[in-house]
Amino acid sequence: MKRDCRLQIRLTQRELDMLNRKVRTARTTTSAFVRSAISGTEVYEAPTVDVMLLLRELRRVGYNVNQILRRANSSGIVDMPRFRKDMEEVRRAAEAVTKAYGVDSGRKERKK
């Protein structure tokens, strides 16, 4: 859809400063920020590099633990209820980070 309509609004200096700060924090454009607000989409603070690295590491840990679980389960040497509980804690940590920053967790939903 072509965006050919313009909007001009008047703001106080304080309102403009607040808008600019939110736009910078979200690392987006003013136009994209306003369109998101109009559509009711939640605008999140853009994650820092540290958060992205943390999320990547959480995914890696979860994947590795899952692989260990598969091998250990096939040999019958793991306390499965405890292991599942630990895995769920890793998932919750990753989901908390993704929810806070509105980033894709990279987790694929399982078909039931």
Image (cartoon, rainbow, N blue to C red):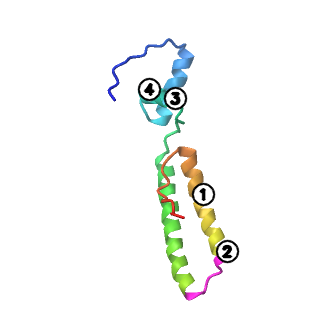
The crowd level at tag 3 (other Cα within 10 Å; few <14, some 14-19, many 20+) is: few
Residue 83, numbered label:
none
Of mark 3 and mark 2, the one earlier in the sequence is: 3
Residue 41 image offset from top left, x and y in percent: 52, 35
Part of the protein shown in magenta: 75-82
Q: Residue at x 50, y 44 (%)?
A: 47
Picture coordinates of residue 26, whole percent (x, y) = 48, 36
Give the spatial CA distance, label 4 vs label 2.
Answer: 48 Å
Q: Label 4 belongs to which residue? A: 30
43, above or below 77, in the image: above
Name the residue rendered at 38%, 17% in the picture: 6
- Amino acid under label 4? Thr
State whether residue 26 is above or below residue 79: above
Residue at numbered disc 1: 93
SS label for mark 3: helix
Type of amino acid at the residue the image marks with label 1: Ala
How many numbered dots are placed on residues in this image?
4
For marks 4 and 2, the one nearer the N-term is 4
Where is 28 relative to 102, above or below?
above
Q: Secondary structure at mark 1?
A: helix
Where residue 82 is drawn, which disc sits there?
Answer: 2
On the image, numbered disc 3 is attached to which residue? 37
Name the amino acid type tagged 3. Ala
- Structural distance between the alpha carbons of marks 3 and 2: 43 Å
Q: Residues within 10 Å of mark 2 (few under 14, many from 20)?
A: few
- Give the mark toward the camera: 3 or 2: 3
